[in-house]
Image (tube, rainbow, N blue to C red):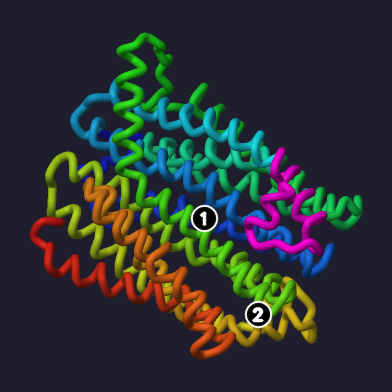
Amino acid sequence: MKRDSIDFGKTNIPRLFVKLFIPTVLGMLFNSIFNIADGIFVGKGIGSNALAAVNISAPLYTLSTGLGLLFGTGASVVAQIHLSRKNTKAANINITQALTIPSVLMCGIIVLIMVFAPQLNYIFGGSEKLEPLSVDYIRYVSPTFLFMIIMIVGMFIIRLDGSPKYAMLSNVIPSVLNIFLDWAFIFPLDMGIKGAAIATSTAQGLGALMVLLYFVKKTKVISLYMPKFSRTSLRLTARNAGYMCKLGFATFVGEIAMSFIMMTGNYTFMSRLQEDGVAAFSIACYLLPIIFMFGGAIGQSVLPIVSFNHGLKNKARIYSTLKLALCLTATCGMFMTWLSVMFNDQLLMLFIDKGTRAFEIASSGLDYYSAGFLFISINLVMITFLQSIERSKIALVFMVLRGFVIVLPAFFILPSVIGDAGLWLSIPVAESAVTLLIAVYTVINRKKLY
């Protein structure tokens, strides 16, 4: 089955991987640049408390990302297996359900977010001092969460349809617009943190519009399916949604876990280092998407190749894809750690001025934090691989271990044992432990996996 010159079953694996990886990583790169630029404009134009306030809202971003990945990952695996077996209608039904169900759900969540924004400030680790800033940001940025779901699910489907370049543009164009609007609203127009939030909502809205326009005019094989509302159709929709959620649940748990990690980090940094500590932690959270960019791009490039060949039971191509992905993942992870260590102060000065207390806290901890970059990338790729071959249960186990079981206790135990460095080492310790467990599982079950 060829879609835009992409044959998932026969094209040489390295060539096929490059066709998917380059547009995917470029799209994510621009999204990461937007995140960094947003942090730079907020930190330089409004101040370190604004940086901390934006970080207070981070769990809401991970919730919307998690819902998008939950249905995007699950639908991508299921639809790709259907396509490998020439069942296009079933694939169309699945991707339509994957777009509509989380979008409707998020509309209800946004109403709750706007009503309970003050309470969310304290739930997510904020203080009375940060409340006015965080409440303004949360309320004005809330439409972004719906747009993010449409973009995330849509880009999975667009890549599946053989158009990774359009998926890339759906990331790149909104990111460029966001950077411009951030600058315009924060500096010339002096709109403060409201301006940063409105800039994000506007740009993400454009991205969602681009995704929807693709389904109206540009689809090649996949298309949206007119939903039916009979009792039988609703029962089948619930069944399909359940299976997609089963396959994508590990990714969703990972994103929700990131919310809890950020909340726990906000609490622990606040309790030991006050608002300046949360501001320092927020810089690390701004840099983290770059690390997730490589692991996520590699994983999302692996997923359609592996799931298609899993449907064909072609184990040789599955093994070749995984081997290539892990080599690239290790290289990227080590490079990002080296980059962070070598240019520690230069990275931090992008966000806040040297000599401030927040800068000193971040400077002393970033080297410890960067030790986890390699393990984060490997874990993301391996968990996505397990999902793509329908090993959803073990993928969920590893995601729960890295997101809750190990890292959350580490945030409380390590600082009491080794001091403030333990705050920064909590994530690297958890990720390295999970990498070891995945390696043991893979060696023991090698013949069953590929």
Q: Are marks 2 and 1 in contact (CB under 8 Å)?
A: no
Q: Taking 242 as reference, is 292 above or below it? A: below
Q: Which residue is mark 2?
A: 272
Q: Taking 218 as reference, is 353 above or below it? A: below
Give the camera-side residue of 68 and 104.
Answer: 104
Q: Is residue 340 left or right of residue 56?
A: left
Q: Answer whether residue 339 is visible to the viewer in this image.
A: no
Q: Residue furthest left?
A: 447
User: Between disc 2 and disc 1, whose residue precedes?
Assistant: 1
Local packing at callout 2 (Cα closer than 10 Å; few below 14, some 14-19, many 20+) is: some
Q: Quadrant of residue 69?
A: top left
Q: Quadrant of residue 128?
A: bottom right
Give the camera-side residue of 115 and 316.
Answer: 115
Under tag 2, what secondary structure?
helix
In the rendered image, residue 218, in percent from the top left (x then y), is placed at 48, 27
Q: Is residue 310 left or right of residue 57?
A: left
- Residue 73: in magenta span: no
Local packing at callout 1 (Cα closer than 10 Å; few below 14, some 14-19, many 20+) is: some
Amino acid type, callout 2: Arg
Q: Which residue is mark 1?
A: 26
Q: Provide the residue span drawn in magenta.
A: 115-141
In the rendered image, residue 342, in percent from the top left (x then y), is placed at 57, 86
Q: CA distance from mark 2 to mark 1?
A: 38 Å
In the rendered image, residue 344, in percent from the top left (x then y), is placed at 62, 83
In the rendered image, residue 308, in percent from the top left (x then y), is placed at 23, 42
Please, what is the dominant secondary structure of the magenta stretch?
helix
Give the camera-side residue of 416 and 154.
Answer: 416
Amino acid type, callout 1: Leu
Give the camera-side residue of 448 and 58.
Answer: 58
